[in-house]
Image: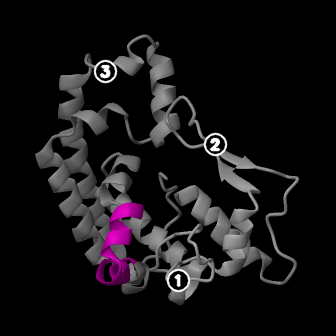
Amino acid sequence: MSPTPLSATGMAAASDDIHETKLDAGDEITRDLDQMLAHYDGNQGPEFQSQTSTATLEAERDVLGLHSPVRLRQHLSDNMLVHAQQGLQDAVAQLPVTQRQAYETAVAQAPRILELESPPSRFLRATGYNYWMAAESLCQYWNLRLEVFGPEGAYRPLTAFLEDPEATTQALTPAAVQVLRTGGLSVAATPDQFGRPILLVDRERRIICDDKEDEGTRAQAIFYILQV
């Protein structure tokens, strides 16, 4: 799942200096991208050759968001990618501790899950290689995961169809697993024309439970579907 960037939490009072650095870093990466785009402007991928400029722009925005041209995924040089990834990590280190703590815990406790669910390159692409925005979105992803699954499940794998639904090695609670097994929420076998998964909701099937934990259970089920 390509994650949707959430609005960043408030920065600490000392973040004024960081904001100035963001502008400088953004200018630098923008200059690099402008130079690259000038070189590749007439060499769009075959999937867009038959479309008008307007249609191409709309497709690019639809797939990756307003700030991320599709062709950058194919043509970004290795050096620029390494530069952006290092910039992202530097940006994470300058965020307030409360904003980056969940992410840093994932780095320490669940590096494989982090690699599978939230590779930094995915957030860089979604933000047009603005590593400051990518750093904030990446940290927000893990803050949300912690909020949805709690400290016990936040760093466990998203598995819903193990032989033992009561297994304690998974992030989902048994109630959330049961919701998913009803088939009320599922992903279509065929993606849309841009390769994105299609979420199906069967209104004839119950996708919530009957107790006060409905919201938490439903949040876990939806998080699982959107991520997996």
The three-letter code of the residue at mark 3 reads Gln
Residue in the foreground of this view, choosing between 182 and 14: 182
Q: Position of residue 228 (x, y in %)?
A: 52, 57
Q: Residue at x 71, y 56 (%)?
A: 185
Q: How far apart are labels 3 and 2 at the CA level?
A: 29 Å
Q: Secondary structure at mark 3?
A: loop
Q: How far apart are labels 3 and 1 at the CA level?
A: 43 Å
Examine the structure image and report whether residue 77 is included in the region drawn in magenta: no
The three-letter code of the residue at mark 2 reads Ala
Furthest-front residue in this view: 163
Q: Position of residue 65 (x, y in %)?
A: 48, 42
Sooner in the amino-acid sequence: mark 3 or mark 2: 3
Sooner in the amino-acid sequence: mark 3 or mark 1: 3
The three-letter code of the residue at mark 1 reads Gly
Q: Nearer the viewer, mark 3 or mark 2?
A: 2
Asked whether residue 14 is in view, the answer is no
Q: Which residues are magenta?
A: 103-117
Point out which mark residue 44 bears: 3
Residue in the foreground of this view, choosing between 201 and 118: 201
Quarter of the figure with residue 67 = top left
Q: Give the residue at mark 2.
A: 188
Q: How far apart are labels 2 and 1 at the CA level?
A: 27 Å
Q: Give the residue at mark 1.
A: 153
Q: Nearer the viewer, mark 3 or mark 1?
A: 1
Would residue 160 appear left or right of 13 to someone viewing this image? right
